[in-house]
Image (spheres, grey):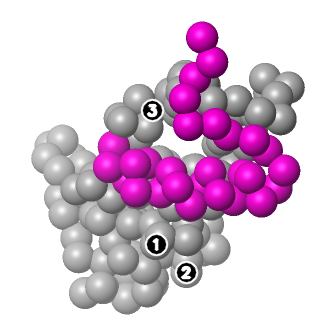
Amino acid sequence: MRIYNNQLIKVFTGDDLNTSDVISKLKGRDPAGFTFRDEKNNIVFYDIDAITAKELQLVIRKSKTATIAIKLNDEEVIDYFYIVARVQLLEHDRESCSEDELYVWMNASIDSGIVNSSVWSDAKPKVIRRLQDEGFVITETSIE
């Protein structure tokens, strides 16, 4: 996962792209980009929507340097952050924590740019509400 243009994107590279399943999942999605490096190490960009799934599959399989990124929709963003937060609560064996503690744990487990992004800020109320619906207690201020 990465942040690109204030959006959370999922990046597929190398082995991720060696199956037809992944190719079919990419078609019809909102791509953030599709690139690969040619023989001269130049980055070549393709518009995913302009080529067929079969062409996409052939180009990717020929290239060991292909990278495809898709933009996640709002529900997928909430799911991603919820899973990260829930895992951190479970790993720390806690049913309650402050937002500050949760931030520190998440920041240590995923890319700092993701947790410091507006994407997290926008998703945080929904993620916290979902955690609370699952029985976790998240307080607004840290206990010092």
Q: Which residue is mark 2?
A: 24
Mark 1 Cα within 10 Å, few/some/many (few <14, many 20+)?
few
Above or below, 140 relative to 122: above
Residue 79 seen in the figure: yes
Q: Which residue is mark 1?
A: 73
Residue contact at pointers 3 and 2, CB within 8 angstroms: no
Q: Which residue is mark 3?
A: 111
Q: Quadrant of the C terminus?
A: top right
Mark 2 Cα within 10 Å, few/some/many (few <14, many 20+)?
some
Instruction: Name the foreground residue: 40 vs 34.
Output: 34
SS at mark 2?
helix
Query: Range of the magenta residues?
Result: 117-144
User: Who's the residue at 74% across and 53% down the image?
Assistant: 132
Q: Amino acid at mark 3?
A: Asp
The mark that comes first in sequence, 1 or 3, is: 1
Is residue 135 part of the magenta span, yes or no? yes
Q: Position of residue 60 (x, y in %)?
A: 41, 64
Q: Amino acid at mark 1?
A: Asn
Above or below, 22 relative to 41: below
SS at mark 3?
loop
User: Who's the residue at 56% across and 37% down the image?
Assistant: 140
Q: Nearer the viewer, mark 3 or mark 2?
A: 3
Distance Cα–Cα, label 1 vs label 3: 19 Å
